Image (cartoon, rainbow, N blue to C red):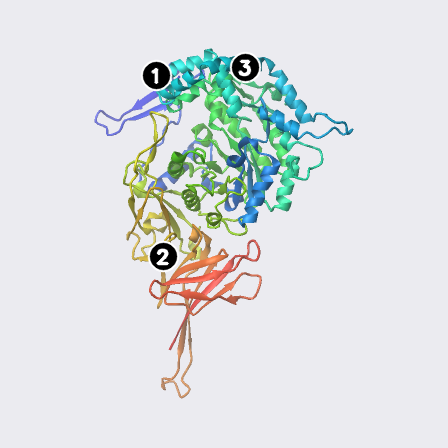
Amino acid sequence: PPSTSKSSSSSSSLLDVVCYSETGGPSNNNNNKNHNVNALYIAVGNDPYELLSRGFQEVADTLQTFETLSHKNIPSTVNDFGWCTWDAYYSKVDPKGILQGIQSLKDLGVPARNLILDDGWQHVSPQPKEWNQLATTNTMNDDDGGGGGESAATETLSSTRASMAPLLFTEKMGRAAFHVVASGITRFYERHVQRSHHSSLSSRLWTLMARRTLLKNGLWNYFDTETDFGRQLDSLEPNWKFQNVDSCTADNTSLTLAELVHKLKTDLDVKKVYCWHALHGYWRGVTNGLGESIGIDVTQAYTNPSKKLLRMEPQMAYDTPTLFGVGMIRQKEDLKTFYRHLHEPLVNAGVDGVKVDVQSGVSAAGSGVQSDYELARMYTQEMEQSVAERFPDGESGAVETINCMCHSTENLYRYKKTAVARASDDFYPDRPESHSVHLVNVAYNSLFLGEIALPDWDMFHSKHKSAELHAAARAIGGCPVYVSDVPGQHGEKLLKKLVLPDGSILRAQKPGRPTRDCLFADVGKDGKTALKVWNQNRQVTRSSGDASGGVIGVFNVQGVAWNFDTHENEAFPAPPTLTAAIKPHDIETLRPHQGPFAVWSHREKSFQVLPSGEATTDISLEPHEWEIFTVEPVQQSGFVKWAPIGLGDMLNSGGALLHVGPLEETTTTTNSTFGEDAGDGWWRQTTTAEIETRGPGRFVAYCQPAPSSIIVDDGSSIPSHLDFSYDDESGLLEFTLPIEPKEGNHHKVTVAWDHRR
């Protein structure tokens, strides 16, 4: 039961604070007077971003249960482009499809250096029904050459289905009865249950039917045939698609997981491979049989969601853990054993890291047996210990793990080692109302999540109606960039604005967050406010002499918002065209600079020079339109003004700049040939600007006047002069950088202005 406390300083106080806490455990009841817990942190300040950073650090120091992102190393994978198997294949993924996906992107010129092998590689029970046919189709003959022999995979499938015979019989009876009234039940659910309050009569009636009538069999059939949510992890070996130990077939359909990883890395230049798994094994946990096989205890628990949870997610009253149970491990030593047996085979197969999903679902399984937070704490701590030991990133010193579905505080406040976490619900290719909401969610969630982990803004499709919207957000989000394209279905031009030819990306340096002026605006439905997201493009130190640059993404995401009454995204007709004001000081790290600033508009390919940080430029955006502005302080020395922007055709142009040095002047003089006072001597003043930048591509900069020369040095050959073009009216300077000769050899560019008298 929950405990509720209310605090108020006086009857005339301006603020009443209500704290609501739930543990889900039997020890938490209204008679328990021991509430000595750190329940609430309040701080006040003028800088919202500094306030969040300071607040999370003080909470971390107090609780001693997690570390803030500023104290963690980030995996090097976040700087490289990736491909995830999920939206391309879902759980039907196999080695052949994976190789096709990676090859397709490589052929396009945007190689994926990271692969996330999502759900679909594990051995689960009950097995998907279509696997019977697929396994038989792919069965090899026995070693003795006899025809018709079953492989070990097929035998496993057969024995699994045989052990389920009573359930299958019941299922058939339930399905037959269900089909008689299926249309009526469906209409009842859609009209009276789907959008109703959890305590409504219709919702309570549906829950009763789901738990105590033949509807339960119908729901089981639905979960079994249409989703993977009813399955449990049944073995710690990969399933038959990734387990064939016979010789590889010509079309790569029979690769083991280890063979697949080897082929990806040696033939297709993939650097890192991650595998997906749920925090507790699979969607509905693990089977008792798995526990017996490795000598651990497994408890099949039935979740009992609280009223607060049901208010947010009424479907939890009749989801698979509630109706059919979830297999949980409740002893710390057993969890150590479980993660050892889960992760060590992946390490042996050459897998570099894991994506750990369904994390917030673990705490719901503690109800009635063990406190939710205690169970979540144990799972999270043992998972982190295992991945830190088995999946370290030798390049960055980080842990190769992506946390997912993890926004419960009992998960977030346990991350001492892992440094990346998904910031939102999934990318849904076939739900048009979800895409603008996705951007809103990741941006605002990153305000808090970004203090504990680097927010992952999820995958997307590069060939999609909303592809540009998603790509623009990923470009300035400071997040990993990876797609889940079906092989051969790519937005080539769009991807080449995100990914360099070597497979790296131009990642901004901080979690992307909303600007101050839209922190408390409803950018989804107030009809007037655009979503603006800011980021920094270079980490600088005082000793470097560098001036930090930044980027602002502007998005018209009006027209869709979450409806807390109907529990779904609600679209509004005719979302408006918006006008948004952009200023350099929208970028928090540019506030110490007073100006002027050069502002590059990506889509318009144009410059503006704003005299101060508070000076604005306006932009008009149609629904779902966007723009990206790269902002750089303008340096001035003598007669030269200078602001490098970056690779002008990339979405995050300024992400290419690794270092920007200050303008430097040198003067050369000669004496008169007829004496010091004759007046025929001369002097030459040379002003130089040095930058280090990524390439290849069209580099753009603002300067006045035109330079005299541009020299590039990539460290592998003699420095060479570059041709350039210059527009006197706008001050736009353009030149083309060659491809980098090898990884790590970035271009050092010197721009010079000579003035002689």
568 horizontally vs 74: left or right: left
Q: How far across and down, in percent of the image, does residue 60 sit?
A: 43, 34
Q: How far across and down, in percent of the image, does residue 128 sit?
A: 57, 25
Does residue 22 appear in the picture of this structure?
A: no
Q: What secondary structure is marked by label 1? A: loop
Residue at label 2? 606
Q: Earlier in the sequence, mark 1 or mark 2?
A: 1
Does residue 190 appear in the picture of this structure?
A: yes
Residue at label 1? 200
Q: Is residue 68 above or below residue 313?
A: below
Residue 134 found in image quarter:
top right
| Residue at the outermost top position | 212
270 horizontally vs 7: left or right: right
Q: Residues within 10 Å of mark 3 (few under 14, many from 20)?
A: some
Q: What secondary structure is marked by label 2? A: strand
Amino acid type, callout 1 = Ser
Q: How far across and down, in percent of the image, does residue 512 sit?
A: 40, 43
Q: CA distance from mark 1 to mark 3?
A: 31 Å
Amino acid type, callout 3 = Lys
Q: Nearer the viewer, mark 3 or mark 2?
A: 3
How many discs appear?
3
Q: Nearer the viewer, mark 1 or mark 3?
A: 3
Q: Label for residue 172?
A: 3
Q: Earlier in the sequence, mark 3 or mark 2?
A: 3
Q: What secondary structure is marked by label 3? A: helix
